[in-house]
């Protein structure tokens, strides 16, 4: 009898109230749900990109020919700078997870150190993206001849760089997707840096030390890793395929 | 334990761990980082060389193979980020699946429908391009010979195709 009662209690106890069935706090659970919805948004955008990419395989620009610039270097190295950007973002993801780990040990000094490095990495990434956009918009010195719709007819003109209506490297829709998706991701990184700075100030002020736990680092860490996760996919779909 | 308190049900606020446990955890995290670094460099090297050798041209079999490799490596990296960095691998099973299941179901369908529709759209576009070129040639020939019958005959299909195309 008693054995049966215990078994029954155990099987339903997680959902009987009094404790979290998921075993995580309210904030962390809803950060996860927010990330799922955000992941669906990004997946929708990347699938739309894939649709156009797959529809125009012959005329789609080759990323290896588009993104060849590198700072302080006159020649062309394909994909080098975007590779560096990816490494910076992965690196900042590691420093974030080390900040979370230091938070588990209530080590305020280490949390401050790793969180500071994360903010630097994020800022470097946003700056790199601005640099990349600048070179994509300005384009090459020689340009390319494209037919443009002007005053009711199609005329051939030399185009330099890319914007929302014309694109030196190929179809204008490539530039549209590039601006929208990397811009949306860059805005996520930017807001992530702002959130990290707010948390960083709180860490220095000792808010979480007083609270007794550094769970807030874990929540912002989830968001930060998500930004890295999205970049891994953006990098593959835009620069490698 | 702290002045912070809410009236919500109890949960483990943070898995506190000791200095030694921290050491092993940090070693695991750095190992994950090295794996991701190597995979990223591998992707870049393959991407650069494949591009310079022309292996990514859309009509070659190698391009499909390379795409499969790239997507596979990317999903591998994503797995490491989600399960190790975002700690989802160590959460409760019910949480793990309520995060992953809805996402995976929607995404598989979205990928399927995008590939199916883009194949159709690509074939349709090619067919239309061929038809329009054919129509233009026929119209030019008709105009050159000055035969009115031919012009009238081709008038309606041309308009129809133009309407569909724009």
Image: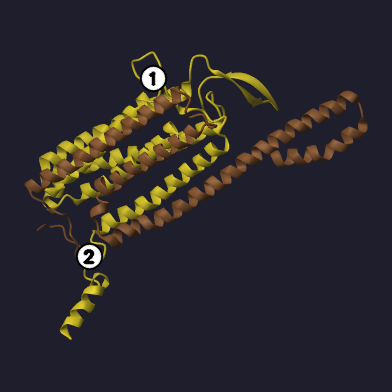
Secondary element under disc 2, as helix, strand or loop, is loop
Q: Is residue A7 above or below residue A149?
A: below
Q: Quadrant of residue B95?
A: bottom left
Q: Quadrant of the C terminus of chain A?
A: top left
Q: Nearer the viewer, residue A163 or A211?
A: A163
Q: Nearer the viewer, residue A128 or B94?
A: B94
Q: What tint does the image give chain B?
A: brown
Visible in this render: residue A219?
Answer: yes
Q: Nearer the viewer, residue A197 or A29?
A: A29
Q: What tint does the image give chain A?
A: yellow
Count of residue discs:
2
Q: Residue at the location (32% across, 40% down)? A: A228
The residue carrying mark 1 is: A77
Q: Nearer the viewer, mark 2 or mark 1?
A: 1
Are the residues flagged by discs 2 and 1 from a single subunit?
no
Q: Quadrant of the N terminus of chain A?
A: bottom left
Instruction: Indicate the position of residue A69 as horizontal and vertical percent values.
Output: 40, 20
Count residues near mark 2 (Cα–Cα under 10 Å), then give few for <14, some for 14-19, many for 20+. Answer: few
B35 relative to B19 in the view: left or right: right
Secondary element under disc 1, as helix, strand or loop, is loop
Q: Quadrant of residue A14?
A: bottom left
Instruction: Indicate the position of residue A226 as horizontal and vertical percent values.
Output: 32, 44
The residue carrying mark 2 is: B8
Q: Residue at the location (87% across, 33% down)? A: B151
Count residues near mark 1 (Cα–Cα under 10 Å), then give few for <14, some for 14-19, many for 20+. Answer: some
Mark 1 — on which chain does it sit? A
B156 relative to A19 in the view: left or right: right
A184 relative to A124 in the view: left or right: right
Identity of the residue furthest to the front in this view: B61
């Amino acid at each position: 009898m008693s054995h049966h009662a215990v078994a029954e209690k155990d099987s339903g106890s997680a959902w009987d109230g009094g404790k979290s069935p998921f075993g995580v706090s309210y904030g962390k659970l809803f950060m996860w749900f927010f990330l799922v919805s955000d992941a669906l948004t990004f997946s929708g955008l990347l699938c739309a990109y894939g649709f156009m990419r797959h529809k125009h395989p012959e005329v789609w620009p080759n990323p290896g020919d588009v993104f060849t610039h590198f700072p302080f270097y006159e020649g062309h190295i394909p994909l080098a700078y975007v590779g560096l950007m990816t490494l910076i973002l992965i690196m900042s993801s590691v420093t974030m997870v080390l900040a979370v780990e230091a938070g588990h040990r209530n080590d305020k000094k280490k949390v401050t150190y790793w969180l500071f490095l994360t903010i630097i990495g994020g800022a470097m990434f946003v700056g790199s993206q601005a640099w990349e956009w600048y070179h994509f918009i300005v384009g090459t010195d020689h340009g390319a001849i494209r037919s443009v719709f002007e005053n009711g007819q199609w005329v051939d003109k030399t185009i330099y760089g890319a914007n929302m209506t014309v694109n030196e490297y190929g179809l204008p829709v490539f530039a549209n997707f590039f601006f929208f998706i990397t811009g949306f991701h860059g805005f996520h990184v930017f807001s992530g840096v702002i959130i990290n700075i707010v948390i960083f100030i709180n860490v220095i002020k000792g808010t979480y030390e007083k609270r007794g736990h550094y769970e807030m680092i874990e929540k912002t860490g989830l968001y930060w890793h998500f930004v890295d996760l999205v970049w891994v996919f953006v990098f593959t779909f835009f620069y490698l395929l | 334990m702290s002045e912070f308190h809410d009236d919500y049900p109890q949960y483990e606020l943070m898995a506190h761990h000791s200095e030694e446990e921290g050491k092993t955890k940090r070693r695991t995290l750095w190992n994950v980082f090295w794996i991701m670094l190597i995979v990223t460099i591998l992707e870049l090297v393959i991407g650069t060389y494949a591009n310079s050798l022309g292996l990514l041209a859309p009509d070659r079999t190698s391009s499909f193979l390379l795409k499969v490799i790239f997507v596979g490596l990317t999903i591998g990296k994503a797995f490491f980020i989600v399960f190790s960095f975002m700690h989802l691998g160590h959460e409760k099973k019910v949480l793990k699946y309520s995060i992953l299941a809805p996402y995976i179901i929607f995404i598989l369908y979205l990928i399927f429908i995008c590939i199916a529709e883009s194949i159709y759209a690509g074939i349709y576009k090619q067919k239309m391009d061929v038809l329009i070129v054919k129509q233009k040639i026929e119209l030019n020939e008709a105009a050159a010979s000055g035969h009115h019958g031919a012009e009238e005959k081709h008038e309606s299909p041309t308009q129809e195709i133009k309407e569909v195309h724009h």
